[in-house]
Amino acid sequence: MPDKNLFIALLFAGLCFLTYGNSLHNDFLMDDYPMLIKNLQIGDPSFLQLNIDAHQPQKYFRPLCHILNLVTYSLFGENPAGYHIFNLGLFYLACLLLYELLAIILKSKETALLTSLFFCTHPINGVLVNYKNAPSYALLVVAAILALIHFVKASRGHDAPLNRGLGLVWMIVALLCHELVIAFPLYLASILWFLENKRVKDIAKELALPVAAMAAYLFFRTTYFSLNTNVISPALRGDFHFFSFLATYAKLIGWYAAKLVSPEGIVLIWHTPVVQNSLAAWGLNLSLATSLAGVVWLGIKYPRPNPALFAISWILIGFLPVVPACLSRLEFGIIIEPHWLIFSSIGYFLLLAIVFSRLKNRVSKRIWYSAISALLLFYVFSSRHYNYLWGDQIRYCRYWLTVSPDHYWPNFWLGYAYLEDKNYQEARRYFKKIVETGKGDYETLGNLGLSEYRLGNFAAALDYFKRSLALNPNSADTHYYMGNIYLKSQMFKEAEDAFTRAIKLDPSLVDSRRKLAVISEIQDRIKK
């Protein structure tokens, strides 16, 4: 047994390196900069979400995500390889623990191994390694699996108080990484029903502790960090009917399912307009209803224990938290982020493993092993291709735009990358595209103003800066650049006010102090 465990550990180590080895030197990109490299507040209690404030404008509460960012930044600074290695280590641990969990609950190490191999190599999970400012995604998987292992052991009567306590601790760890862990009791219930063959009364007893903890968490989240103000209320005010939303939701789920089956077009965030066409809405809703009816029919037809139905249930459980999550950023449309479903995607990989396991005695061993090897290699090389795309911000955002051309974020980060590269014409192009769609937030307007400023179009720059400050008057850099424009236009009073405001907001802006001194000298000469 120790030799076999060592083989499994080495197998996953080699496979993780083969799949993600070409990502280790990928540079920082997108929100790695505001979250890590250029984040002046990274050690502040407000960044770590350690301040409990009922009026704090937060859409989410993920303190462990922020604490991990502080830890990794303290360890690796501006060395991107360190972040990748750290994330890869957590992902490797997640793969091993997934194998352990499935081996316990399925009683089939072959199926457990195949499932974990597919999970390890499929590119839909690449975000766990490539997204440097989100090591919490891999930690979420690790913690949720450990929690399930302990709760399952408790349900079997193995040191029940200890295992329930440890399960609760790990569940809370996972929950503090991401709110989508709110579905955890359903994952546990699925194991107990479809695999452990427990009665409803016994399942209710095992779920009492995690459900109570989730209820306490929901009370906390609706009381603090403005969950209702920032997520629930805007969603209820959405300018669409429930029937249209349901069709749009079905479209999101269909998109994600297609990426699992054929891993092409995977992006960090995908959005779609609300389905307004009544015929399309009826078709999508009918497909959704038919799929659910089919699952119910399978549940009635086939007895327990049933690993295939268990796998299907996990996939469906993951879709439930997507309902509120997809409405969390209505300013950017109705969205889906593949990493929301990282845990539930285990169900798909398990279904795939079950199919292969059942084929094993129906085809020759050579064909069977060749098919598995071919699929794994396909996943590995697909993942390596995505790693390559993640290696450069312009490259990734250009690819992202081919999948979601009108989405805010690829346009914003592409404009930002061109701004950093001093390609102001291209930067202006993408920031302007956002503004023309009516999604011009203060950062986009400010960056568009900066692009015009660098191109020498001061009147246009000033207009965008003013529009940016109307949305966020506390941007020190915007006041600074406005001061420069006023100074060039010999509007000394306006320039003085702008530079003074910039210094008040950010005392580190030394050049603002120098410009104030210049203005003072000019005014003294004028008086003389």
Image (cartoon, helix red, strand yellow):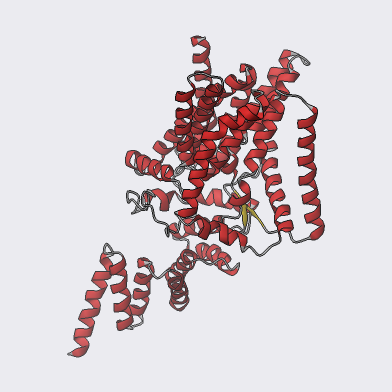
**Residue at 31%, 69% in the rendered image:** 502
- Nearest the eye: 520 or 456: 520
Residue 21 seen in the current view = no
Residue 153 location (% of width, % of height): 53, 22
Which corner quadrant of the image does residue 100 belong to? top right
- Residue farthest to the left? 528
Which corner quadrant of the image does residue 462 belong to? bottom left
Left or right, 407 with respect to 504, comes to right
For the C terminus, the quadrant is bottom left
Question: Does 481 sit above or below residue 410?
Answer: below
Residue 67 location (% of width, % of height): 38, 43
**Residue at 19%, 85% in the rendered image:** 524
Residue 308 location (% of width, % of height): 71, 27
Q: How many marks?
A: 0
Residue 486 seen in the current view = yes
Residue 287 location (% of width, % of height): 79, 46
- Residue farthest to the bottom? 528
- Residue farthest to the front? 201
Which corner quadrant of the image does residue 235 belong to? bottom right
**Residue at 51%, 38% in the rendered image:** 128
- Nearest the eye: 146 or 504: 146
Left or right, 96 with respect to 362, comes to left
**Residue at 52%, 35% in the rendered image:** 210
